[in-house]
Image (cartoon, grey):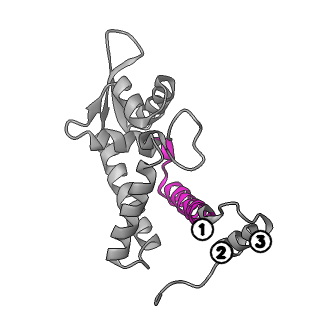
Amino acid sequence: MAGEPPRDRADDIQDAWRRELPGVPVESIGIITRIWWAAKTFGDERRRLLASLGVDVATLDLLSTLRRSGPPYRMSPGELAEACMVTRGAITQRVARAAKDGLVERATAGSGYHARAVTLTDAGGALLDRVVSGLLTAEDRLVGHLAPERRDQLAGLLRELVAGLGDADAAGQVGDQAEGKV
């Protein structure tokens, strides 16, 4: 097929296993190995970029979740934990760090420490806009060698693949702990 990339190491691995274990299905190597390689590249680039922008993955997840909730960009800790797919304890820690940095505000009941609601501050929104803009621009460059129709095709194939795996919402990111995504 014209325009196809040359054979790569995944092809060599697949061929070797086909030779060594005849009759064992090896076709998944051509898919899963390349997905792992791409995920590592994407993950490494995301961590590098986020570090250069001064934010970690957990803070990005918290701020992004609040922003995507729409105005007034406020959620309860329980809603945040569910949306971020982490424990309430993890959300408490994330919120405390972000509040200390002025990125969110916690509304508490009475003199209690526990937040009743968490709201994105103007500073948190400004940081998030800068980070997401930089991140999406960088990630667009990572797939920029694919023609728009190939990107759409790949997105559809990956959507179909993930849907067939079961609980896609619990997937998280490469390297996440079992409790949920970071």
- The residue wearing badge 3 is 19
Q: Is the C-beta separation of discs 2 and 1 under 8 Å? A: yes
Q: In the figure, is residue 80 to the left or right of 172? A: left
Residue depicted at 51% across the width and 36% down the height: 180
Closer to viewer: mark 3 or mark 1: 3
In this view of the protein, which residue sits in the foreground, 170 or 99? 170
Question: At x 31% / y 12%, what residue is drawn?
Answer: 109
* Point 41% across, 49% down: residue: 163
Give whichever of discs 3 and 1 has the lower sequence position.
Answer: 3
Q: Residue furthest bottom?
A: 2
The quarter of the displayed image where residue 66 is located: top left
Q: Position of residue 33 (x, y in %)?
A: 62, 63
Residue at label 2?
11
44 sits to left or right of 136: right
**Residue beneath disc 1:** 30
Q: Identify residue type, mark 1.
A: Gly
Q: Quadrant of residue 179?
A: top right
Q: Secondary structure at mark 2?
A: helix
| Residue positioned most to the left | 71
Picture coordinates of residue 97, whole percent (x, y): 48, 33
